[in-house]
Image (cartoon, rainbow, N blue to C red):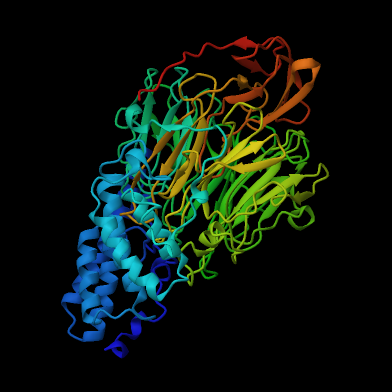
Amino acid sequence: MLNRLPFLKGLSLLALVLFSTCKNTPPQEIVDRNNPPGHVRMIAILDSIFKKASPLDCYNLNGRKAAMFKDKLDQTSDFSARISLQFRYADQLLNAGQNESATMELLDVIQQARDTLTNETKLIYELLALSYLRLGEQQNCINAHNAASCILPLEGGGIYSMKSGPESAIKVYKRILAKYPDDVQSRWLLNLAYMAIGKWPAEVPTALRMSPEMFKSRGDIRFQNVAITSGVDVRGISGGVCADDFDGDGNIDLFVTSYGLKDQAKFLHNNGDGTFADRTKAANLTGIVSGLNTIHADYDNDGDRDILILRGGWLQGGNHPNSLLRNNGDGTFTDVTIEAGLLSFHPTQAADWADYDGDGFLDLYIANETSDPARQHPNEFYHNNGNGTFTNVAAALGLNITGFYKAAVWGDINNDQLPDLYLSNVEGENKLFVNRGGTAPDAWKFEDISNKAGVTYPLKSFPAFFFDFDNDGFDDIFVTDFTIDPKVPTADPLIQEYLGKQPQGDWVRLYHNNGNETFTDVHRAYGLHTITYAMGNNFGDLDNDGWLDVYVGTGKPDLRTLMPNRMFHNVGGKRFEDITMNGFGHIQKGHGIAFADFDNDGDQDVYAIMGGAFEGDLSNSILFENPGNQNHWVTLFLEGKTCNRDAQGAKIRVHVVEKGGVKRMICVTVGTGGSFGSQSLRQEIGLGKAERIESVEVQWPKVGVPNGVYSGVALDSAVKLTEGVAQPEAVALAPMHFKH
């Protein structure tokens, strides 16, 4: 019988779908002059893309793909062909979240294979175990989720009440491991299944038990998930988040997206009482759908933050337009992509704003994804014309390069008031372009110093950002690994690391800025020699100690890759400590992340989008409430006059005096943080044990503008600093309390 199943040999779930594409031709209405204005036209374009998308060409149309395989299965009589189609049908049912149906199909395939576990049939058994495990997740962690759901170590409310799914998974995993004891992925999932039913570690067979040390918390930092009670537990697949005060009431709101082609973007208004209200319809966003990532900025300098949605990431057909949503200042948004000259059709999820030429208006760099040389998707660089429109100057400036770019971030590596550009590449070397200035927007000079600077690794990377982790006044670079290997769709290397072994793979890079346009990789010395499979990322100060911490959302498309999202606490600028198991280790796939003081109490909370790439890999977003601490803080609002309105790119140095007259400098840069997650442009700065603020120094992001030095700023206060105005202005923020 087994020689009749050759299709199973070497079969990889990820290989079946990873490099699929969407090949639809852009709809005709784009060029139809009789169409209604741009906002309505964009909605029509997005709806047309959803309706016409082929399930074979798109990564996240698993229900349609399952139906297609079922139709072929019903029309096929050949035994081998039927088994192959049935397996693929079950695979897509599983990816679509139809776990019970997937289980029935897999059991039938196994029965036809005479229930024989071999190298050729092992993957079927893995999927069967996974289908049971996913059923348990769906019944408990997703459909009946609570504040403790899906957070490692599973305990308390995280223990499943409906246990049949993981109990059945345990039986299958035991059978797999009896024959394949070195299968660390199955061993990991077996332990998670035991944990889900409250029988870990005691009842796990000794030889298969993961060490309890792996799940041990470190230190005193522990946050609580309040997403449910605050009304922000949005359910979806992978997506992005913008966190900022979009309506000017002093409270930080949320804008979230989800990757599905018909998934509605949502605007969640902060009510100021510890709860949020869904105002999507009132905000004029109905029909604005999809988007793997989103970032925000005040591109028109009117004092209201606008939003850019990035679409088509991993879908290399390039028929998914981005959306620029203009904030109208009245609680509504209008899609102005077409009018602004930003309509294009390339796959992307990476972009960032900066005023590269110092004209006072933010420009936009978009990094696209090219993996097929026959279909080029050059990067785009849009100069802001200052009148609501943009001009693509990428070719003129030599920045229309191609690659599989997954992050684009701006920083000022040499403190010359000119923003520099870093790009991470999942299929090659990363790039660093230093801004050398110029005399006109299209005659500017950017120099590629990637190799000289020493920042090209890892060669398979994903999220990245600039931040000053050691407060020396120079922007450092954090860039994470993301190895895509169709032969290893699971997370084996990470689990090997958990087991204390040296895995094959690449690692996080922490590049320390040497102050001379070169960098030194210090990730080993700082405790970051780890594999993360990071997708989302951002940074902030968990405990207001004045040292920036890092949270990364993790995962891979394959449903077997359940791994904790990771939190790294910066210990005095000397090392990073992994505090993932202090309540941050959510095991659903993590994407957009934002640190922000949602409750205006002086410390930063953390919001994270959870959910995978497949349409059935759903999860609920989380909001980790900061419990508070004894350290001091200051919140700064900057306003540019000759530079861009929010002073994005400005460098802030807070000079404080600690006990005994000891002086200290704390450094931050105005921006939205990481490359996958967009956080508030107000700067929430921890001051540690400071006894007073000596001064706040601002390097404005425009050549020739002198630094502003401000005195009289009080501890634990919020103030506005305006370019050219000597005195700080107090800002009143009303603290609130999340409901528990």
Total labels drawn: 0
Vertical relation: 337 (above or below) 556: above
Vertical relation: 91 (above or below) 60: below
Q: Is residue 35 visible?
A: no
Of 591 and 367, the residue lying toward us: 591
In the displayed structure, does residue 90 sit left or right of residue 740? left
Q: What residue is rendered at 25% in x and 83% in y?
A: 81
- How far across and down, in percent of the image, does residue 167 sit? 27, 58
- How far across and down, in percent of the image, does residue 610 sit? 40, 45
Q: What residue is rendered at 65% in x and 29% in y?
A: 360
Of 717 and 67, the residue lying toward us: 717
Q: Quadrant of the N terminus?
A: bottom left
Of 471 and 37, the residue lying toward us: 471
Q: Quadrant of the C terminus?
A: top left
Vertical relation: 655 (above or below) 41: above
In the displayed structure, does residue 390 sit left or right of residue 205? right
- How far across and down, in percent of the image, does residue 281 sit? 29, 31
- How far across and down, in percent of the image, does residue 131 sit? 29, 61
Q: Is residue 459 visible?
A: yes
In the displayed structure, does residue 579 sit left or right of residue 440? left
Q: What residue is rendered at 75% in x and 26% in y?
A: 665
